[in-house]
Image (cartoon, rainbow, N blue to C red):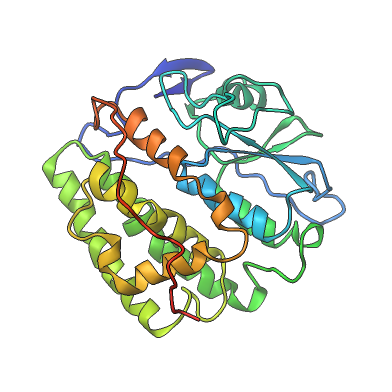
Amino acid sequence: MGMFENGRWLVKRSWASDDGRFKRQTSQFRHWVKTEQDARFQPDEGRYHLYVSLACPWAHRTVIARKLRGLDSAIGLSVVDPFLGEDGWFFSDAPGCIPDTVNGARYLRDIYLKADPQMTGRVTTPVLWDTHEQTIVNNESRDILRMFSTAFLPLGDPRVNLCPEHLRQDIDKALDEIYEPINNGVYRAGFATTQAAYEEAVIPLFESLEKWDGVLARQRFVGGSQLTEADLCLFTTLFRFDPVYHYHFKCNLLRLRDFSNLWGFVRDVYQTPGVAETCNLTHIKQHYFSSHEAINPTRIVPVGPKLDYDEPHGRG
């Protein structure tokens, strides 16, 4: 693992702070693509490129949105190797990877440095790159998701809107409620370096899972009857739960499969046309179990568990 400090690459051995708690950095690039005529970044077809890791749940949500919204031809895609080492994310010819066809970079950090030669911070995915301005527009997954359903709406399938105006307030509320205890909670548990920091994360995580299992007992999706951004953000964490977080991050009070409604929800979203082809369990398991040497020193990737995401979900 590594990060930039004033444009210089440094290797960092731990994600945790001095008190043992995992602290997620704030995304540095927060520009927006807008439809206004005078906007710096406008939604032109072929202008933007998305850099992702298929292992990363934050990037995965943008890959799903790109697929469901029919933006494949409008927005290019590059996929890094699943292994994250001292040099950061890199491009390779491993199965499932897609090289950088826009900038010809070897490392994703080269893209960040091109956008900001004095960059300070971690190199993360997803990254939305503007080929006209030759810079990073945004590296915050929640912003990119929203742009795909607003500014980019005319470039994709107009019938698919993951954030319709009348549901936007409810979607934002759900995203806020899911983020800290679940999306970030698994990392706060997994990267904690003290018992107190770990328990401080893992207990609210399972309380929140219980809550959403109850919500999904009453309705098909997070916001009701329609698939939205909120479902994608919950799904990408839950999809990784039993294969990775339960073991690797010690989130083991229960398995996801022990929550009947959450497990049914995951299968429901997975079976939505277009979603399964964005899910790469090989990349996911290779990344977590081989990249986090401090958590898994042997870097052995487990062969299990056996999961059938195609099993009927019964949530129609």
To which quarter of the image does residue 273 belong? bottom right
The image shows residue 67 at horizontal and vertical percentages of 66, 55
Look at the picture and state if 312 lies above or below 182. below
What residue is drawn where x is 19% and y is 52%?
Answer: 200
What residue is drawn where x is 59% and y is 39%?
Answer: 29
- 15 left or right, relative to 3: left
Which residue is most to the right?
37
Instruction: Tell which of 309 and 18 is nearer to you.
Output: 309
The image shows residue 44 at horizontal and vertical percentages of 84, 48
Which residue is most to the left?
195
Q: Can you see residue 128?
A: yes
The image shows residue 97 at horizontal and vertical percentages of 58, 33
What residue is drawn where x is 48% and y is 22%?
Answer: 4
Q: Can you see residue 208?
A: no
Q: Quadrant of the N terminus?
A: top left
The image shows residue 61 at horizontal and vertical percentages of 54, 53
Look at the picture and state if 315 lies above or below 251. below
Look at the picture and state if 292 lies above or below 27. above
- 84 left or right, relative to 191: right
Question: Number of callouts in the render?
Answer: 0
Instruction: Tell which of 8 and 53 is nearer to you.
Output: 53
- 202 left or right, relative to 153: left
